[in-house]
Image (spheres, rainbow, N blue to C red):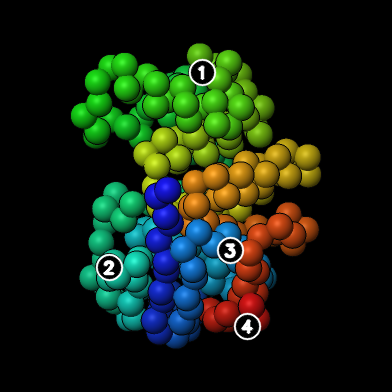
């Protein structure tokens, strides 16, 4: 089975003016671990996720995925070269594309045969229970279904890491729990390393590890 990456963060610092979003943060996450970040607004959670994903550049410090250093201060490996996927709170789906086309967009750079391209999309949608909704546009789907399409798009490339920033933030409690169930299932079935932010502590009850962040540091694990 393909194993998720270990993550090692060493003395990560990121400032926005006078605000230290990451303040010398060091952290190790095991391969295949499901980790949840909790903490107040401005504690550094989103900056940490975005730095892991390569969207933000650190001012100093290092990030390792396995034995590979992907970030040393402002020297930053591009997100598409990090073997990861990202899920956002607002779904980030193309409104003019169907669910299948949104998922397939993540495979555009891969040289797949037409049959393999189609089967990969269908498999990804089936894994999130939307095999019958491939022809629907985002406006024809509920918020929970749109987020499941976003998860299918993230997983279709079979990454080793999955990061999610408030993936349940726009959903009611029931749909939020369904999305968390999907993420837990992917974590267990794919041995995927998962790091997410959520504002709902009870949604994190089944995770392997909860990290409480404040002032750009991990205050409690």
Please provide percent x and percent y for residue 98: 47, 19
Pointers 4 and 3 in contact (C-beta within 8 Å): no
- Pick whichever, 101 or 46, lies toward us: 101
**Circle on res. 68:** 2
**Circle on res. 35:** 3
140 is higher (above) or lower (below) than 128: above
Label 4 to label 3, Cα distance in Å? Answer: 15 Å
The residue under the point 40% across, 84% down is 11
The residue under the point 32% across, 32% down is 107
Where does the C terminus fall, quadrant-wise?
A: bottom right
Mark with earlier residue (4, 3)? 3
User: Pointer 1: what residue?
Assistant: 134
Label 4 to label 2, Cα distance in Å? Answer: 27 Å
Label 3 to label 2, Cα distance in Å? Answer: 20 Å
Q: Residues within 10 Å of mark 2 (few under 14, many from 20)?
A: few
Mark with earlier residue (3, 2)? 3
Label 4 to label 1, Cα distance in Å? Answer: 43 Å
Quarter location, residue 201: bottom right
Report helix, strand or loop for mark 3: strand
Report helix, strand or loop for mark 1: loop
Q: Residues within 10 Å of mark 1 (few under 14, many from 20)?
A: some
The residue under the point 25% across, 26% down is 112
User: Pointer 4: what residue?
Assistant: 219
Pointers 4 and 1 in contact (C-beta within 8 Å): no
């Amino acid at each position: 089975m393909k194993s998720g990456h270990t993550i090692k963060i060493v003395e990560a610092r990121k400032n926005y003016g006078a605000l230290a979003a990451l303040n010398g943060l060091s952290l190790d996450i095991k391969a295949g671990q499901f980790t949840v970040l909790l903490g107040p607004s401005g504690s550094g959670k989103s900056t940490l996720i975005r730095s892991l994903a390569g969207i933000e550049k650190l001012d100093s410090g290092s990030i390792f995925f396995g034995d590979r250093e992907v970030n040393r201060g402002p020297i930053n490996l591009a997100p598409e070269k990090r073997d990861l996927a990202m899920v956002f709170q607002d779904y980030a789906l193309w409104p003019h594309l169907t669910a299948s086309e949104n998922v397939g967009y993540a495979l555009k750079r891969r040289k797949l045969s037409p049959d393999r391209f189609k089967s990969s999309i269908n498999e990804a949608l089936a894994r999130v229970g939307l095999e019958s909704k491939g022809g629907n546009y985002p406006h024809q789907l509920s918020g929970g279904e749109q987020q499941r399409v976003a998860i299918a798009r993230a997983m279709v490339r079979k990454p080793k890491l999955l990061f999610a920033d408030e993936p349940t933030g726009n959903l009611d409690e029931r749909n939020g729990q369904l999305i968390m169930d999907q993420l837990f299932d992917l974590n267990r079935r794919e041995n995927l390393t998962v790091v997410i932010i959520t504002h709902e502590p009870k949604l994190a009850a089944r995770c392997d590890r909860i990290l409480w962040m404040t002032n750009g540091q991990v205050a409690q694990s």
